[in-house]
Amino acid sequence: MANVTVIGAQWGDEGKGKIVDWLASRADAVVRFQGGHNAGHTLVIDGETYKLSLLPSGIVSGTMSMIGNGVVLDPWALRDEVQKLEGQGVTITDDNLAVADNCPLILPLHRDLDGLRETAAGSGKIGTTGRGIGPAYEDKVGRRAIRVCDLAHLDDLEPQLDRLCAHHDALRAGFDQPPVDRAGLLAELREIAPFVMRFAQPVWKRLKKVRKAGAKILFEGAQGVLLDVDHGTYPFVTSSNTVSGTAASGSGLGPGSTGFVLGIVKAYTTRVGSGPFPTELEDEIGQTLGEKGHEFGVVTGRKRRVGWFDAVIVRQSCAISGVTGIALTKIDVLDGFETVKICTGYRLRNNVIDYLPSHAGDQQLVEPIYEEMPGWEESTAGARSYADLPANAIKYIQRVQELIETPVALVSTSPERDDTILVRDPFLD
Ligand code: GDP
Ligand code: IMO
Ligand code: MG
C-alpha cells in the first residue's frame, strides 16, 4: 500500500506544511504522530495563508485528518485553532477530524513549568516555544499524564490529580510558585471536555479500518530530525522522537504501514532556538537569506538563524530516518547569489569527519568544510517543471542529491501549493 511519511530533515521549518497540503489531495487520510502546537506549518493556497500548529495540514484540503496518540494535545489550543480555521472558511467536524483518545494533555501547569525553567536557565535556555511540550511528555513517560479519554471521566479524576499535583507542587515550590489550583484546573477541564470529546476516538482503530479499505495514508511529522530527542543536537532538541519510525508508534499502525519516507529539506539551513549550528551565517549573506526566505517563526515570531546548506546533517537525517526521497524546498531563495556554498564535511580537532558527533561539546566545535558552486541569476520562483530551472540550479540540486545519497522526489519553488515540481510521485512508488 502506497502510504507516505513526511518528516523534516533539518531543524524544522523545512516546508513540511506546504508539501503535506500538496500531497493531501492524493491521500485519503492525514495523521499527525508526534509533537504538539510547538509546530508551525504554513500553507498558501491561491494567495490565502493558513497557519497550523496542531491540526494536520490535510484539514484545509478537506482530507480526513487525525491527531495520533504520539501528539501532546493542548485542548484549548485545539479549540482556538479550530475556531481560527473555521473563520477562514475551513469546515471542521467529527467527519474530517479525529483525535486519539490516548493522547496526553498539555495543561496550563505544563506551560508554567516550561516558562519557569527557561527563565531560570538564563543564557543556557533551550529556547523552547514555551508551549509546555517538554513537561507534558515528561508526565506521559512518568505515568502521571491526564489523557483525552480521561475527559469523559472527570468525576474519577481525583487520584490522578493527586499524583500529578504531588509532582508539580514540589517542582513549583522550587521556583517559589504556589501549588496547582486543583479546583480551577478541574473546572477548566470540565468546560473544555465536550469540545474535545466530539473528536475523540481510538485512532488506531480508525486507521485499521481505512487501511483495510485500501486508503492512502499520509503521516505528517513535525519539527525535524536534528530536533529529535535521541538523534538531534541534545539537549537542544524537542521532547519527542521526530524520526520516521515514530509515525507507526505515534499513530497506532505497524512499521510496515508507513510507506515512502519523504524527507523535507530546505535548500539552505535554518534553526530557531539555541544550540549548535555549524553552517550558521552571522554576516550579510545570512541576513539576505533570512530576509528573502522570510525566516521568522510561525509560532513565536522569533527570527530564525540562517546558514548554508549542510549536506552532513541531511545525509545523517536521511540515514537515520530511512528517507526514500526528499522534497527540496525554497530553492528560489537562493536565486541571485553569485556563488552558493554547501558544507560537505566537518573539521574537528584537526580531523575531517563526515558526520555530526553525538557529544554536545563536539557539536559546538565542528567547523564546516565548504564546496563552492556558481549561483544563478535567473528566477526559479514559481517554476513548475525542471525545464523552467536554470542550468546552475539543476546542478545545485544534483550535487545535493549526490552528497546526501538520496534522490529528489519534489522541488518547491514558492510558498504557493502548486508551485511544485514533481520528479517522482511518492504515492506511486
Ligand atoms: P514547516 O514547519 O516545515 O511546515 O515550515 P514553516 O511553514 O514553518 O516554514 C516554511 C516557510 O517557507 C513558510 O513560510 C512557507 O510558506 C514557506 N515556503 C515553503 N516552501 C517554499 C518555497 O519553495 N519557496 C519559498 N520562498 N517559500 C516556501
Ligand atoms: P515545525 O513543525 C522549528 C524548537 C524550539 C526549541 C526546541 C524545543 O514548525 O518544524 P519545544 O517547544 O519543542 O520544547 O522547543 O525545538 N522547535 C522547533 N523549531 N520548527 C518547529 O516545528 C519546532 N518545534 C520546536 O525552537 O529550539
Ligand atoms: Mg514550522
Image (cartoon, rainbow, N blue to C red):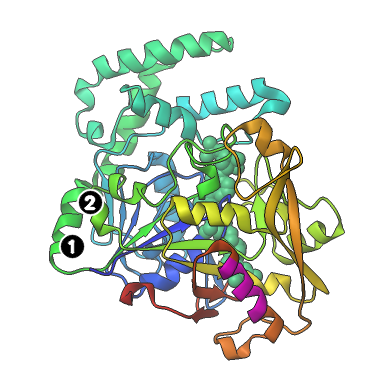
Q: Which residues are magenta?
A: 394-402
Q: Quadrant of residue 20?
A: bottom left
Tell me the distance, in whole angstroms, between the alpha carbons under discs 2 and 1. 9 Å
- Report the residue marked by disc 2: 253
The reply to whether the magenta stretch includes residue 396 is yes
* Residue 191 pos. (x, y %): 33, 34
| As drawn, 368 above or below 408 | above
**Left or right, residue 205 beside residue 10:** left
Does the magenta-highlighted stretch encompass residue 240? no
Which residue bears the numbered disc 1?
A: 211
Q: In what quadrant of the picture does the N terminus appear?
A: bottom left
Q: Quadrant of the C terminus?
A: bottom left
- Is the residue 235 above or below the residue 177 in the image? below
Identified by mark 2, the residue type is Leu
Does residue 395 sit above or below 94 in this rendering?
Answer: below
Residue 82 is drawn in which quadrant? bottom left
In the image, taking residue 421 as reference, residue 197 lies left or right, namely left
